[in-house]
Amino acid sequence: MINVGIIGFGTVGTGTARILLENSDVIEEKTGIRINLHSIADLDIERDRGLKVPPGILTREVSDILDNPDVDVVVELIGGIQPAKDFILRALNNGKHVVTANKALLATDGGEIFEAAGRNSVSVGIEAAVAGGIPIIKVLKEGLVANRILSIYGIINGTSNFILTKMTEDGIDFSDALSEAQVLGYAEANPALDIEGFDSAHKLTIISSLSFGIPLSYDKVHIEGITMLTPQDIAFAGELGYKIKLLAIAKAVNGEVELRVHPTMIPESYLISKVDGVLNAVYVVGDAVGETLYYGRGAGDMPTGSAVVSDIVDIARDIKNKGASRCGTGFIGKRSDLTIKAIGDIESMYYFRFTALDRPGVLSRISGILGDHNIGIAAVIQKGRQAGAAVPLVVLTHRARERDVQKALQEIDRLDVVADKTAFIRVEGEEVQGLND
Ligand code: HSE
């Protein structure tokens, strides 16, 4: 029998406890191991979570779990950096295995945690930290272990995806869509983590390290959120045959890795652009397997609990078999030869929305500057004649270098015929047949 102590009786803690209480029989049938919910620690042990737990397992004292010799696996589900980090290190130093859903902590302090686990010969299970119920950690560490991973594209923040879906379907503003997400309880306690792209970047940090062997590199991820997107850009993207998604992208390109989170236009025909609402998806390309796609619930009590329990079961199997760890660091930090590309060095296609005065010659001035910076135009949309007034002028480009794009936009935004800062969105997919092709 393996004894599990959970720290944090919130949404995921409740889901994990429910699964352990309701599914331990089937897990035992599958694995031959009894997983026992030994204890749950939380500051609030009075609140009704809609779950009947056996008497005597709730405690307000984390030491009842962290320092209890009977507990084999500590599950950390309080989130945030501290005191979660101290609890995890204390558990590891006490010789206990740890399972955590704490993506922010792993992305920033994972190195120290894995080092402590190694020193104490115990495991750290992290499946629940990325994309909730989608077993993407297992996919990268086990299912696709035979591959060199070439690229990953993830919709890995359900809140942002819900907001973008609402803006697309209902034509509403960002702030109205965010309010709906908050009412429905999807957003993190601090919604900036979701809408500014930080949560996606935490998750990308973890899966890119597992995929490419780079150290956990959160501070090198280029991060842009969705707060600047307008229903107008979403509508123009639709007219051009694209959906806008907050994508987390990791690509290996010529000995370098691109790590970036930003709103991205994806062709409507791609499967991943059909991933709507709070759902998550991760598209992984391996050199042997080719393209693969994983889809499911990226948050919530039971989906995330499902991932937590899968790690507990893996650790239980290791304990039973006295075997090597299935959880833990995998490929993280094993390679030092790959550098992370600066955002200025990436190449992409781009969508620009200029706010230009409706005067003769404006398009040629703008396209002249784009041409000077080696940026080819693939499509143009201009609507709404209002002589002398500012109107949106939309341009889709061929593949261009980001540094050139930034310089061109700075020049264009200084033109007297341009009335506002230009909106730009990076575009994925096949090159569009161009005006000059
Ligand atoms: N706030 C996160 C999301 C929860 O919206 O996906 C899961 O990490």
Image (tube, rainbow, N blue to C red):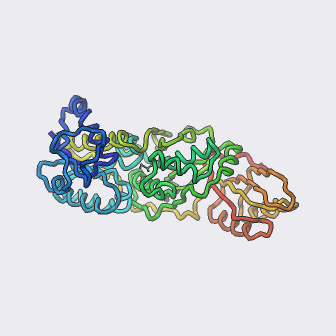
Quarter-of-image position of residue 166? top right
In which quadrant of the rendered image does the N terminus lie? top left
Tell me residue 231's x, y (percent): 65, 50
Nearer the observer, 345 or 421: 421
Residue lying at the far left in this picture: please name it. 69
- Can see residue 436? no
Quarter-of-image position of residue 321? top left
Instruction: Tally the marks.
Output: 0
Nearer the observer, 147 or 239: 239
> Is 377 on the left or on the right of 294, as rendered?
right
Identify the residue shown where x is 51% and y is 52%.
249
Tell me residue 206's x, y (percent): 39, 54
Tell me residue 180's x, y (percent): 52, 47
Identify the residue shown where x is 54% and y is 57%.
225
Tell me residue 156's x, y (percent): 47, 48
> Is 272 on the left or on the right of 23, as rendered?
right
- Can see residue 402? yes
Identify the residue shown where x is 50% and y is 56%.
197
> Is 412 on the left or on the right of 293, as rendered?
right
Nearer the observer, 169 or 332: 169
